[in-house]
Image (cartoon, rainbow, N blue to C red):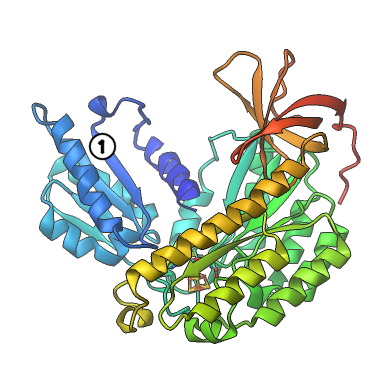
């Protein structure tokens, strides 16, 4: 979502004649977009500012703006501690960025813009054309969260759940496709909580899938509590919807899920996976896990490992519990740090083994790849298969924006390498 936000910020500041630069030395305005989900986020900001100060030691300083959730949660601390920062701007106030920069151009005195104005923000995003021209484009459809998991800062930094108008989203999706997008990834902190005047995520997917030149749709991140029957069904009815579902479970222990206030059980989670697999056995899952949550015993951890083996997630994103100030879990008695670290190492080694054997199983198989761009090395193209695996092939023909059948020859943990077999662009992708 920060990538999407950064691109919208770029769209906005172009309006006041700012252009991106690859050369930090020549910047006269520096915007750092930040994430606050785990510890050390604020330290990273101070570290970055230190780096910037060195670059500009013998030159007039640029305007320095800190955007994103660190600005929202700790903006006052940033402004107090680091005089080099001119303004902090929270994620729901980006539409005020030009105004803020204009003020700073006239006079550098600290500005704090951290109100929650989500409706106004998206109204201002809508008036600009998406200019990134990417084959795979993000589209934020929902923001914020009302779930209040006890470990998480999102409800405090992004605010309450808000769904954008479906009419506007369909317009924006059309615009993305006109600008070259062939895949749209619908984004939201809880994307499947999307609900605009009774229009749910499944309704929106169906509408967007009618866009002629759009070939693929994905959505992330889903919450098990909102994985309703209509969303499961849409995986049967919409062929453009890709068969990889990122569905964070966090833990395989019901006791820990309850302590986290996750509002779902392991059994409910398994039921969703089972129903989806019944509809399409090609569906694969990826997930997020928190290891060492306060109160997690060795048995709770074993249950998490059991779940990972049972589902065989093709990608597992795992984090050691990070106590975030202001969240209810902050004051809970923590699992011993070295024990938590050992559990994370064990978890990651098991998750990697599962991933390795999955990736090995792809060798000599044929996958459908949507190519996104050419690479620096001559005649090489980068794309993703239906399960979002990165694939590289060699081709003399420009493959950008095309879907091809690729036979996988070899691979490592991050990339698969293959060769093109049959062209798939003629496939009937009708919804
Ligand atoms: N809304 C999604 C859900 O319900 O699972 C997750 C969104 S959250 C921005 C992304 C991931 O960060 C979470 O799934 C969780 O695994 C991780 N995370 C969030 N807060 C954390 C914390 N305090 N410590 C460790 N990991 C955390
Ligand atoms: Fe955070 Fe996701 Fe829980 Fe919301 S549902 S509080 S975003 S982890």
Q: Position of residue 122 (x, y in %)?
A: 49, 57
Relative to the observer, which residue lies in front, 368 or 298?
298
Relative to the observer, which residue lies in front, 59 or 169?
59
Q: Residues within 10 Å of mark 1 (few under 14, many from 20)?
A: some
Relative to the observer, which residue lies in front, 354 or 383?
354
Q: Position of residue 306 (x, y in %)?
A: 65, 71
Picture quarter containing residue 366? top right
> What's the residue at 49%, 56% (across, down)?
123
Picture quarter containing residue 334? bottom left
Does 158 appear above or below 55?
Answer: below
Does 261 appear above or below 102?
Answer: below
On the question of residue 363 being in view, the answer is yes
Q: Position of residue 358 (x, y in %)?
A: 72, 48
Does 6 appear above or below 395?
Answer: below
Q: Position of residue 4 (x, y in %)?
A: 50, 48
Left or right position of 190 against 36: right
> What's the residue at 37%, 80% (across, down)?
329
Left or right position of 260 against 242: left
Residue that label 1 marks: 29
């Amino acid at each position: 979502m920060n990538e999407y936000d950064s691109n919208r910020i770029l769209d906005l500041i172009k309006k006041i004649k700012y252009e991106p630069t690859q050369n930090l030395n020549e910047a006269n305005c520096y915007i750092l977009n930040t994430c606050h989900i785990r510890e050390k986020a604020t330290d990273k900001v101070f570290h970055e500012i230190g780096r910037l100060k060195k670059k500009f030691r013998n030159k007039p300083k640029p305007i320095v703006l800190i955007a994103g959730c660190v600005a929202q949660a700790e903006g006052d601390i940033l402004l107090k501690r680091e005089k080099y920062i001119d303004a902090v701007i929270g994620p729901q106030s980006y539409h005020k960025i030009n105004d803020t920069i204009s003020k700073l151009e006239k006079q550098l005195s600290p500005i704090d813009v951290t109100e929650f104005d989500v409706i106004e923000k998206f109204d201002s995003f809508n008036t600009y054309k998406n200019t990134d021209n990417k084959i795979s484009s993000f589209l934020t459809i929902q923001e914020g969260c009302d779930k209040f998991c006890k470990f998480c800062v999102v409800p405090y930094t992004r605010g309450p759940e808000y769904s954008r108008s479906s009419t506007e989203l369909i317009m924006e999706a059309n615009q993305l496709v006109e600008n070259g997008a062939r895949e749209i990834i619908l984004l939201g902190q809880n994307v499947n909580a999307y609900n605009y005047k009774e229009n749910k995520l499944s309704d929106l997917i169906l509408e967007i899938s009618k866009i002629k030149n759009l070939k693929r749709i994905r959505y992330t991140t889903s919450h098990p509590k909102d994985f309703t029957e209509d969303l499961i069904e849409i995986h049967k009815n919409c062929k453009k919807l890709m068969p990889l579902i990122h569905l964070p479970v966090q833990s395989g222990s019901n006791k820990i899920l309850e302590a986290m206030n996750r509002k779902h059980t392991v059994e409910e989670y398994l039921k969703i996976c089972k129903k989806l697999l019944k509809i399409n056995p090609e569906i694969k899952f990826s997930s997020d896990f928190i290891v060492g949550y306060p109160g997690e015993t060795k048995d709770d951890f074993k249950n998490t490992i059991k779940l990972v083996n049972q589902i065989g997630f093709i990608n597992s994103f795992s984090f050691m519990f990070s106590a975030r100030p202001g969240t209810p879990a902050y004051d809970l008695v923590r699992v011993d740090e070295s024990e938590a670290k050992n559990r994370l190492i064990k978890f990651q080694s098991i998750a990697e083994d599962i991933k390795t054997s999955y990736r090995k199983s792809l060798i000599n198989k044929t996958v459908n790849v949507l190519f996104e761009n050419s690479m620096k090395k001559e005649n090489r193209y980068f794309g993703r298969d239906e399960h979002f695996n990165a694939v590289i092939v060699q081709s003399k023909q420009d493959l950008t924006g095309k879907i091809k059948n690729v036979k996988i020859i070899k691979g490592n943990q991050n990339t698969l390498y293959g060769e093109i077999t049959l062209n798939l662009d003629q496939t009937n992708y009708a919804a």
